């Protein structure tokens, strides 16, 4: 498949299943079952992934080795340690499970930190006092201030509310006004897409997909929503 070929939802789901499976120690047989393909095809997919991302295998190996030494998984960006007593077990299956949890903790824990920071960035926006330049920063107190974040033109914090977090998604309730929705969507993009750099993950691209609708079943892309409103 050409690198420029469009990625379908099915392609994305297959890639996601493959990456998570390999990260957490799933073998070719297990991956074949998950994807509904032959073991041979699962093997081809595995080799293709490692060829495209050669550092992935090293990441898994080094994460397991470090966790084995520390008897736990360390999240350096948040300075947190998750104890994993399974590393000290005489049971090989318990040690293997600890290895899987070590990788899972680093991946999912970092993702959770990104989401928490994205929400914290949103809270900084909506709780800031209105300024002429429409931006905010923490007041100087001798401590390192939080990075400034400019609110987009037309954004009104009183017309949008963060109501829920669902895994790697945030749900907002916004006034049914196209200008308000557009401004809020842009503000949310800035909050979410800038979280990685603020957390110290420089160079990590985290594009945000925005959908809009009256309910879960009516969600459409922000572009489709705006086009319909202006039609």
Image (cartoon, rainbow, N blue to C red):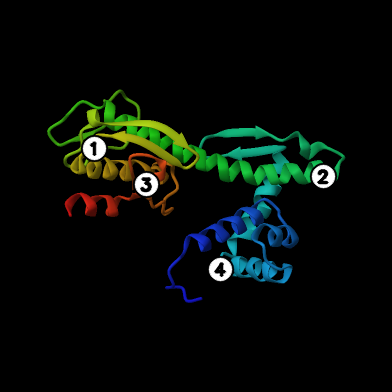
Q: Residue at x 22, y 54 (%)?
A: 227
> Distance of mark 2 from mark 1, alpha carbons?
54 Å
Q: In terms of depth relative to the viewer, which is nearer, 103 or 161?
A: 161
Measuring from the top left, give residue 200's x and y in whole percent: 44, 44
Residue 72 falls left or right of residue 165:
right
| Earlier-in-chain disc, 2 versus 3 | 2
Image position, residue 152 (x, y; %): 21, 42
Q: Disc 1 on helix, strand or loop?
A: loop
Which of discs 3 and 4 lies nearer the camera? The answer is: 3
SS under mark 3 = loop
| Sequence order check, earlier mark of 2 and 4 | 4
Rendering coords of residue 128 (x, y %): 25, 27
Q: Quadrant of residue 123?
A: top left
Q: Kindly report the distance in space between the C-alpha atoms of the residues bearing marks 2 and 4.
A: 30 Å
Going from N to C along the chain, the mark reached first, 2 or 1, is 2
Q: Which residue is mark 3?
A: 219
Say which residue label 4 marks.
Answer: 52
């Amino acid at each position: 498949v050409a690198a420029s070929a469009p990625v379908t939802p099915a392609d994305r789901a297959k890639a996601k299943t493959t990456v998570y499976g390999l990260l957490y120690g799933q073998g070719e047989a297990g991956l074949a079952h998950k994807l509904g393909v032959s073991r041979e095809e699962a093997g081809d997919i595995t080799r293709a992934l490692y060829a495209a991302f050669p550092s992935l295998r090293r990441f898994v190996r080094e994460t397991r080795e470090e966790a084995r030494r520390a008897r736990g998984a360390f999240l350096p960006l948040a300075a947190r340690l998750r104890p994993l007593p399974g590393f000290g077990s005489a049971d090989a299956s318990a040690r293997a499970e600890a290895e899987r949890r070590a990788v899972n903790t680093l991946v999912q824990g970092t993702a959770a930190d990104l989401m928490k920071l994205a929400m914290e960035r949103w809270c900084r926006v909506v709780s800031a006092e209105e300024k002429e330049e429409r931006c905010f920063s923490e007041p100087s107190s001798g401590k390192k201030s939080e990075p400034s974040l400019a609110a987009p033109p037309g954004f009104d914090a009183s017309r949008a509310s963060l109501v829920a977090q669902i895994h790697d998604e945030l749900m907002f309730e916004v006034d049914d006004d196209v200008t308000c929705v557009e401004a809020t969507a842009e503000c949310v993009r800035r909050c979410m897409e800038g979280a990685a750099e603020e957390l110290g993950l420089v160079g990590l691209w985290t594009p945000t997909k925005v959908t809009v609708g009256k309910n879960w079943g009516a969600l459409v892309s922000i572009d489709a929503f705006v086009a319909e409103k202006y039609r």
